[in-house]
Amino acid sequence: MAISKNNPIVDGASGKLGNTLVFRKRGNVTIMTTRPSVSERMPSEDQVTQRLLFAEASFYAKGALNDPILKAEYQAKARGGQSAYNIAFKDYLTAPVLHQVDWSNYTGEIGSTLNCRITDVLAVVNVKVSLFDASGVLVEEGLAVQSSLKLSWVYTATVVHTPVTGTRIVVQMTDTPGNIYKEEIVISG
């Protein structure tokens, strides 16, 4: 792949040249590559699944660009040669990351809290916390509230629960594209 930044011969070129070269524009840069080859083989089941996932991501990204507010938010995250489309596409494919669940303030009493540190490409819009006792019985569940600094999500207990050790915490995160991801953590002694 060759990148042309200031070449008057290929400046603004776009499309196929013969059966060998392809030109495309990315911002103010013209990129020249060889023509991609097309395989005659049947795609594997994993390849078909991946292609469908990429198609969904593309539909999401195109739709996100039709929303001026969402487009501006994605564009603000873009760096270098990235576009709002690239970031929206990535957001669809990338799961939020649950970095930490701080249970130091969770005593099993009503009003005690769990603090979940979560990041995502753009934003996590909803966090649901479920607590299960050591035998797997649901103790309580509800929505966490995003902290004022937007660094974490805080869940406040509404049910008395003891013992705390062995409690399984299930954190369900919904990101901007609407994808739902779950992670589990067990409170150790």
Image: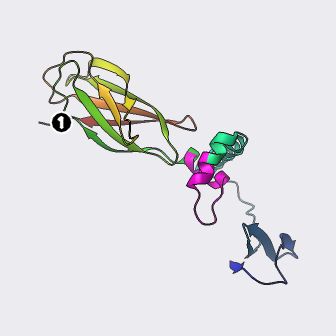
- The answer to which of 74 and 179 lies nearer the viewer is 74
- Residue 177: say if magenta: no
Expressed as whole percent of the image width and height from the top left, the position of residue 16 reads 85, 71
Image color mode: rainbow
Q: Residue at x 77, y 72 (%)?
A: 35
Furthest residue to the top? 159
Q: Residue at x 17, y 20 (%)?
A: 109
- Residue 26 lies in quadrant: bottom right
Relative to 169, is 56 on the left or the right? Answer: right
Q: Name above or below for residue 81 compared with residue 155.
A: below
Relative to 154, is 71 on the left or the right? Answer: right
Q: Is residue 3 visible?
A: yes
Q: Is residue 45 visible?
A: no
Q: What secondary structure is marked by label 1?
A: loop
Expressed as whole percent of the image width and height from the top left, the position of residue 72 reads 64, 47
Label 1: how many Cα within 10 Å (few below 14, some 14–19, many 20+) = few
Split into 4 quadrants, where in the image is the N terminus?
A: bottom right
Split into 4 quadrants, where in the image is the C terminus?
A: top left
Would you name the residue on which mark 1 appears?
104
Relative to 109, is 70 on the left or the right? Answer: right
Q: Residue at x 25, y 22 (%)?
A: 136
The secondary structure that dominates the magenta segment is: helix
Magenta extent: 73-91
Q: Amino acid at mark 1?
A: Ser
- Residue 86: say if magenta: yes
Furthest residue to the right? 18
- The answer to which of 145 and 64 lies nearer the viewer is 145
- The answer to which of 152 and 139 lies nearer the viewer is 152
